Amino acid sequence: MKHALALLAPLLGLGLGLALSRLAAGATDCKFLGPAEHLTFTPAARARWLAPRVHAPGLLDSLYGTVRRFLSVVQLNPFPSELVKALLNELASVKVNEVVRYEAGYVVCAVIAGLYLLLVPTAGLCFCCCRCHRRCGGRVKTEHKALACERAALMVFLLLTTLLLLIGVVCAFVTNQRTHEQMGPSIEAMPETLLSLRGLVSDVPQELQAVAQQFSLPQEQVSEELDGVGVSIGSAIHTQLRSSVYPLLAAVGSLGQVLQVSVHHLQTLNATVVELQAGQQDLEPAIREHRDRLLELLQEAGCQGDCAGALSRARTLELGADFSQVPSVDHVLHQLKGVPEANFSSMVQEENSTFNALPALAAMQTSSVVQELKKAVAQQPEGVRTLAEGFPGLEAASHWAQALQEVEESSRPYLQEVQRYETYRWIVGCVLCSVVLFVVLCNLLGLNLGIWGLSAREDPSHPEAKGEAGARFLMAGVGLSFLFAAPLILLVFATFLVGGNVQTLVCRSWENGELFEFADTPGNLPLSMNLSQLLGLRKNISIHQAYQQCKEGAALWTVLQLNDSYDLEEHLDINQYTNKLRQELQSLKVDTQSLDLLSSAARRDLEALQSSGLQRIHYPDFLVQIQRPVVKTSMEQLAQELQGLAQAQDNSVLGQRLQEEAQGLRNLHQEKVVPQQSLVAKLNLSVRALESSAPNLQLETSDVLANVTYLKGELPAWAARILRNVSECFLAREMGYFSQYVAWVREEVTQRIATCQPLSGALDNSRVILCDMMADPWNAFWFCLAWCTFFLIPSIIFAVKTSKYFRPIRKRLSSTSSEETQLFHIPRVTSLKL
């Protein structure tokens, strides 16, 4: 208790000091309102933002690069500007010789494909007739020394050719599937791109109207915070004053508890002293009588044992403490009569509840002013309401949207046809790739069986059916090669002609900028494709320049310089809100008179404690008597010693009397001395408690009364300063919401609404879709299939040559140790069947 009281005053003074410094600095501190909300506005132009399509690097990129280099060799001519101009403006003026001259590389490839288409099936037909007459593709007639070398060379060449075919057909399968997988999403992306371009400026009026409607977001936010402005003001007052009020109320509660405990200890001290004094008056005669009898008995001549020692202790059998010597506390009790009159715990709890109810109280007192503020906020500025009116370019938007809509509607049937024919191409490609794969399998099986047959040929006990089967597998692959050579070359040339021209005429010129140069040259494009004409602009704009600006993030507002014809800042003037809110906020008032801090009864109790003189009581006088024993000699030890002497006596009468005295001492100790000792312990607790708390109690009481008086007087002024600070902070906070809206509108109108990112994004995505996603795998497919098609020729040649060595030889060379050295050798009959 003493430690708590010692810390009470410094902490209380520190709390009030901190509160004063905080209030002095609170005029510019707005942190108590918390962070302002970040308004989330719905982007008006979100649907038109095109996500860029990026070609992810893969394992086929090296193959794509090889095909592009091959096509650059096939097509060496630059972009045909005049030819394309004639195609777009006047189709009848196009001359065939100009087309042939530009497509010279493709004409050469067409001649090669035609020769292949003519010669390979013809050779196959001739080979078939020859085989029917058993004139070619038969067997080796005579074994000779170079046979093994020729056979090994042919098998190696056939194996290498087969491996090359296998690599080509695997790549053809992969690129065929890749082309089919990417064709669908690529075709579906075309209408999406056109739709984004159509909405480039067509939805600008609706988007501006949507921007104006979102003025309701800051209005709703401000209105919502106005509903809680009274609570915010009360909370701010509560937050900034609680460091003073809470410690003060805690000090009052602690002091009330100290008061109650001190009065209790004082009453206990007084009652205990009275009881001790009465007990000593009863105890003193009884002790004296026992002492006199013991002195008589122990001085008799017949006393045996240590009678002298017992006699010495009996002489000291008298009272030790004298509680009649302690000071009186009646005058202090008289001063504290009826104290505590107040219930400090309930009072502090009630005052805390009143202080904690300040937010609700402030809300009630400011409700009428808040309603007027909400009426002012609900009004919409004239400039915001008419934001969409007078925006330039609205007439051009309809032309742009109509032209793109026509392109989109007319392109859908063609795109569906392209997707359908792509399915046919994929099926045909899978079938022909499977045929080539089957040829590869026939070659590999033929080689394996043929080699197996050759290894077993030296053993007469094994038939030569394995070699014959290997030869037949090789001839089956030859037959499939001749049979499907024509479909293969036709598919290769058809896909090569389409994909090659797309790559060389469109993709290559797109990447090096020749297409933009062609489009920007006046007169090259017809009027129906002129961008300036479609937008209704007074001057022509460069498509390449517009593309570069849009790619850098510029909007049509910047590209077309719309700020010269539309004053956006005039529509975003919200000064009327600032002035109206400031005027209304100045009329806010909050009354804090209901917070008493200390009731009148509690004040009387503290004043009585302050003037009681509790600290002037001389507590050491009490401690002097408390430290003394109730009886100087230990009565229990004396009784035990007398009991021993009684047993040692020869005189039975003396022994009996000593035993009676011992029992009497025990009874007196239990009946009188032990209760006195308990009262002394109780008195010691009260004296110690009062001695520790009384010295500082008057000072603490004076400090608490002074602080309560001071704080009660300063509360209205403090509350007024806090209210003014909160009002200024609240005004700045609410204006911040409107500033967020203004900044968002400025950014939305100048950078996102009518943004031209869809223009550059659509062009970039179109190039990725057409060149990277469609043309690259398409061209890689025909390149791999052409690889397989042309490698079928050496495969046919080596397969036919090799098969002859796998069949049984008609006449074999005899060895020196064969028929001459074996007496009973029976020659094996070989089959001459083809």
Image (cartoon, rainbow, N blue to C red):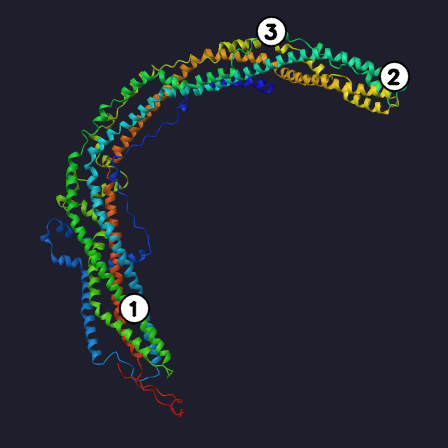
Closer to the observer: label 3 or label 2?
2
Q: Are marks 3 and 2 in contact (CB under 8 Å)?
A: no
User: What residue is rendered at 12% in x and 51% in y?
Assistant: 86
Alpha carbon distance from label 1 to label 2:
143 Å
Residue type pointed to by label 1:
Val
Instruction: Answer with mark 3 or mark 1, whichever residue precedes in sequence.
Output: 3
Alpha carbon distance from label 3 to label 2:
54 Å
Per the image, the residue denoted by label 2 is: 299
Name the secondary structure under disc 1. helix
Furthest residue toward right: 301
Q: Residues within 10 Å of mark 1 (few under 14, many from 20)?
A: many
For the C terminus, the image quarter is bottom left
User: What residue is rendered at 78% in x and 22% in y?
Assistant: 637
Residue 756 rendering spot, x and y as whole percentages: 23, 39
Closer to the observer: label 3 or label 1?
3
Left or right: residue 392 compared with residue 670 = left
Residue 780 rendering spot, x and y as whole percentages: 27, 58
Instruction: Answer with mark 1 or mark 2, whichever residue precedes in sequence.
Output: 2
Left or right: residue 263 compared with residue 793 = right
Left or right: residue 291 compared with residue 392 = right
Residue 120 rendering spot, x and y as whole percentages: 21, 70
Q: Is residue 537 visible?
A: no
Residue type pointed to by label 3:
His
Per the image, the residue denoted by label 1 is: 440
Residue 334's tag is 3
| The image quarter in which residue 234 lies | top left
Residue type pointed to by label 2:
Gln
Front residue (pair 642, 111): 642
User: What residue is rendered at 30% in x and 61% in y?
Assistant: 171
Furthest residue toward left: 92
Name the secondary structure under disc 3. helix
